[in-house]
């Protein structure tokens, strides 16, 4: 079986490779011997291809374009157009037995441009797969809010007409899809990145040694929130103030984590890490994690933390999957939904309502009750694993149904 995965870049990122590795692990239990290809954004394709040996997958560049749209529409009409520039991408689509989109969030007014052009381009791979009569699965993702015109229109078109199965990461995302009135089956399934295994590294070993004498607190920061909060609060100052409070209250060593690295400063978590570190009074009690590490290696670093404050979703997934007490500073309902899986919704806060006093009080609550919270999180993990594996069963059911239909 050939499985075509479509997702975020592998390079300088935690979320994309976390989803790739974990989704492949889950699917491989249901489809042993399957071969995988990953479509990656064209802008990062060269760097992603350099990581093919690390992640054991072939990467093919993908760029939505008017030409791709024309090819898809003509295929729907039974006409064949095969531009040479699109041949590598069309080859993998045509060879695939199933197309699986593993992007972690889609069709949301809260992310990206809401224009016709942007929303149309966001689902062209669904349209092409439909034109080629491939089964299409939208793997675990968050959806909504879906209040604007083109978000709703193209969500209905792509999810309702081109996709055979939708796995929503929480009930609120499921309800957002249900509000579209489409018939595509929707099941709630936690993020597959729960299944990512941590990997040891020199940094993880160093932190483990330090942990013998003092707590380790992880703090992941986000360029997304920094951008969103400009003109309405001092995000960097709040994070620096929280980090100083953590050091004073617990005597901890703070590990500032950058999930996403980018050449453009506006999309670089490392820039925010450095800005927070520069504004800390207790900066000698902190260190920056800004060099590239594989997803499993970064999870190995997070594994050494006694508690985590996360503004990045997959830092939070990594921490919770190992039973680590966690507090989320988020910009979307996905953070509350994630913490709700382990009964910890009260530790989700919205960046728009942040105050240093509120944030430090919430952290103090988390720290004072960390042992009980850790036990509660851990108690929920077997059920989450079962739900993640059930997602693969739903996928297998869809593929079996499509095959039976093709044989008739």
Image (cartoon, rainbow, N blue to C red):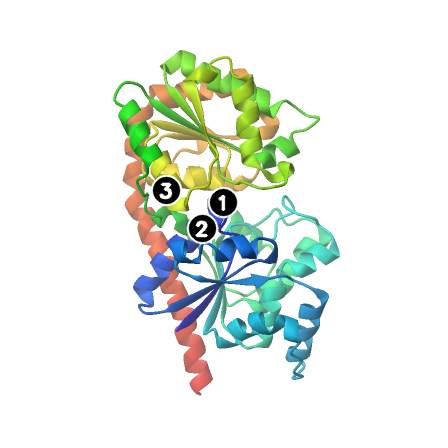
**What mark, if any, has residue 297 been given in the picture?**
3
For residue 101, side relative to residue 2 (left or right): right
Is label 2 in a helix, a strand or a loop?
Answer: helix
Corner quadrant of residue 279 = top right
Mark yes or no: residue 28 visible: yes
Q: Distance between the residues labelled 1 and 2?
A: 7 Å
The mark that comes first in sequence, 1 or 3, is 1
Residue 189 at what x, y percent from top left?
42, 53
Residue at image point 34% right, 68% down: 31
**Residue depicted at x 28% and y 29%:** 208
Q: Which mark is residue 17?
A: 2
Viewer-side label of 3, 2: 3
86 to 363, vertically: above or below: below
Residue 7: image location, x then y, percent? 52, 56
The image shows residue 359, relative to residue 175, as above or below, that is: above
Label 1 sits on residue: 13
Q: How crowded is mark 1: few (under 14 residues within 10 Å), some or many (20 or more)?
A: many
Please give the name of the residue rendered at 40% of the width and 33% of the height, measured from the top-left corner. Answer: 344
Q: In which quarter of the image is the N terminus?
A: bottom left
**Residue 72 placement, left or right of 89:** right
Circles 1 and 2 in contact, beta carbons < 8 Å = yes
Q: In which quarter of the image is residue 346?
A: top left
């Amino acid at each position: 079986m050939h499985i075509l995965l479509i997702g975020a870049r592998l390079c300088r990122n935690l979320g994309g490779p976390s989803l790739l590795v974990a989704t492949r692990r889950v699917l491989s239990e249901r489809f042993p011997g399957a071969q995988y290809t990953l479509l990656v954004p064209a802008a990062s394709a060269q760097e992603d291809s350099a990581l093919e040996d690390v992640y054991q997958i072939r990467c093919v560049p993908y760029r939505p374009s008017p030409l791709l749209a024309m090819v898809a529409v003509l295929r729907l009409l039974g006409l064949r157009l095969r531009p040479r520039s699109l041949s590598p991408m069309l080859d993998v689509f045509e060879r695939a037995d199933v197309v699986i989109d593993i992007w972690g969030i889609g069709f949301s007014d809260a992310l990206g441009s809401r224009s016709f052009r942007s929303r149309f381009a966001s689902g062209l791979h669904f349209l092409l797969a439909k034109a080629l009569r491939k089964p299409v699965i939208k793997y675990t993702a968050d959806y909504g809010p879906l209040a604007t015109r083109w978000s709703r229109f193209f969500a209905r078109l792509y999810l309702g007409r081109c996709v055979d199965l939708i796995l929503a990461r929480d009930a609120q995302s499921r309800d957002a899809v249900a509000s579209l009135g489409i018939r595509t089956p929707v099941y709630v399934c936690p993020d597959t990145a729960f299944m990512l295994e941590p990997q040891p590294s020199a940094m993880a070993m160093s932190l483990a040694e330090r942990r013998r004498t003092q707590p380790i607190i992880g703090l992941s920061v986000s360029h997304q929130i920094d951008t969103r909060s400009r003109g309405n609060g001092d995000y960097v100052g709040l994070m620096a103030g929280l980090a100083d409070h953590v050091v004073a209250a617990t005597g901890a060593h703070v590990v500032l984590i950058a999930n996403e690295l980018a050449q453009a400063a506006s999309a670089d978590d490392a820039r925010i890490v450095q800005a927070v570190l520069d504004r800390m009074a207790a900066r000698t009690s902190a260190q920056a994690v800004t060099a590239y590490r594989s997803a499993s290696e970064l999870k190995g670093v997070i594994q050494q933390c006694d508690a985590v404050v996360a503004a990045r979703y997959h830092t939070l997934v990594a921490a919770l999957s190992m039973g680590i007490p966690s507090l989320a500073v988020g910009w979307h309902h996905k953070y509350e939904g994630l913490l709700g899986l382990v009964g910890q919704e009260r530790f989700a806060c919205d960046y728009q309502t942040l105050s240093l006093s509120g944030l430090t009080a919430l952290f103090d609550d988390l720290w004072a009750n960390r042992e009980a919270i850790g036990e509660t999180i851990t108690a929920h993990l077997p059920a989450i694993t079962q739900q993640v594996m059930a997602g693969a069963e739903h996928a297998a059911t869809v593929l079996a149904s499509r095959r039976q239909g093709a044989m008739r």
